[in-house]
Amino acid sequence: MSVSIPIGPQHPALKEPVNLTVTLDGEKIVDIDMRLGYNHRGIEKGSESRNYIQNIYLTERICGICNVAHTTTFCQGVEELLGLEVPKRGLFIRTLLCELNRIHSHLLWLGVAGHEIGFDTLFMYSWRDREIVMDLIEIVSGNRVNIAINAIGGVRRDVSDDMRAQILQGISQLEARSQYYLDVASTEVTFLRRTEGVGKLPKEKAIELCAVGPFARASGVEYDVRKDDPFAAYPYLDFKVRTSDRCDVLGTAIVRALEIVESCKMCRQVIEELPAGEIKAKAPRKVPPGEVVSKTEAPRGELIHYIRSNGTDRPERLKVRAPTLANIPSVLYSLRGGYIADIPIVFAAIDPCMACMDRVILLDTDHGKTKRVMTWEELRQHGMEWYADRKG
Amino acid sequence: MTRIGSMFPEIWKHLFKKRATVLYPFERLNVPKDLRGKPILDEQKCSLKCKGACAIDCPAKAIVMEKVEEKGSRPVFLLDRCTFCGQCSESCPFGAIKLSEEFELAQYDRKSLVSKQW
């Protein structure tokens, strides 16, 4: 006999609201379904009433953790529409911040993963070491979290020689620490027992379900936007795409730890090869009509922004496809057949970010109380009446 | 090779080290030189003829232009809305706005967060 239980949208095990309906047979998960849209903030609509400069900061606030990825994608798209060439130094600084952001995101994930499986020592120590990279970000950009380095046409702040020395020192510390965490993740029994063979996602399935980012790379899919469709300064850098053929949660942990090491190397390359020159090209305020799809590799995977401009200083449409959304079908697949106690860690393996992902609210008009669909004009009329009633 | 308690040596080592956190507000960390804190207006540089490039570009709508005796207008910063992105200092054609290192801006009253610096 199977039992169906709802988890969420508000639940102590979840950091952000999402609703899971789990069908169980004993402790085994027979089927799992997900309902999204509890964290919808109307960012896409909001972007239509702001100019391109304001939109950089709006897209930055889609996600706090991968904010550089969002602004890079947006700025890149607008630069493409403008036909603007970004100075090489600007691209290098952008890449540096992208990589520092990735290190911070992966260290944060490692801590969260440790916490989900009850290994809080790992959580505390990896978050302490995350402070090193947070300090570096603060030195370069002036803020710990919302980096705001990107501008249309380049970057806003330059990296001085003093900063370069500090970054190099911080990077070597981080490199040693990430090697240590890689060692802990691959030898510690308590970690291995909880992650080995958990949340299996075979390579064929990962390709079929379009998994992205470290989650796909842990299943042996060698796909990385930085390599396959290079942006910013990635074509100038020498790096490897780290994959694992373990196809489980341990694989994602190993891939992420290796990616931190790789990112440290990339940061060092950027600092050493930083070209001289301008950091920003002058960008006009109005963008000619056109549409563009811009993509980058966010810490969680491939991030896509679609921008349509209409010749004014505001975009006509902005669409964001965050990596978490792309990973939802594959994480549901890997949850099936597992144990209920593994839900938190398997779900955490994709590094879920509901705030990134929730771009729409789906209204169930068949089962809900309201069944009316309004046109724009009706909605306007309704709004005016609604306010008139309440004004008295 | 797998082992149990692989983080124990690390933990032992840290028992004799300085703690990683500071007891704020009794101890304070040094903030970096270019921290994006409270915006400061340089009255000398701010032109009265300017229509408010800072207010147009402010993503949080935290800058309000206020009239100065029919001569023109100057910005007022609403620090309760400010996200400290620093776009105002970027957009100002005269370089009149700088973000300071002051970050402890909490107040009991929202009205005292209106920063009129002229």
Image (tube, coloured by chain):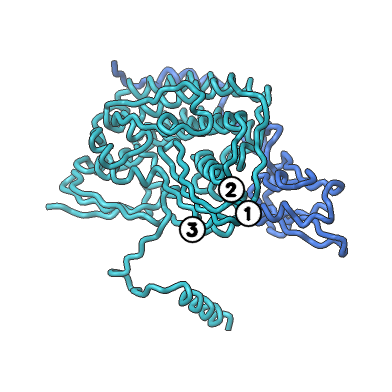
Q: Name the residue under label 2.
A: A57
Instruction: Give the distance between the C-alpha atoms of the residues marked 3 and 1, in whole angstroms.
Output: 15 Å
Chain at numbered mark 1:
B
Q: Can residue A241 be seen in this view?
A: yes
Q: Residue at x 57, y 42 (%)?
A: A83
Q: Mark 1 points at which residue?
A: B60
Secondary structure type for disc 2: helix
Left or right of residue A121: residue B75: right
Q: Depth check: give the residue in front, B97 or A280.
A: A280
Colour in which chain A is drawn = cyan
Q: Name the residue under label 3.
A: A42
Identity, as a three-letter code, of the amino acid under mark 1? Ala
Colour in which chain B is drawn = blue
* Location of residue B34 (image quadrant): top right
Residue B65 vs B94, above or below: the answer is: below
* Location of residue B61 (image quadrant): bottom right
Q: Tell me if mark 3 has few (under 14), some (14-19) or many (20+) residues whose alpha carbon lies within 10 angstroms of its own.
A: few
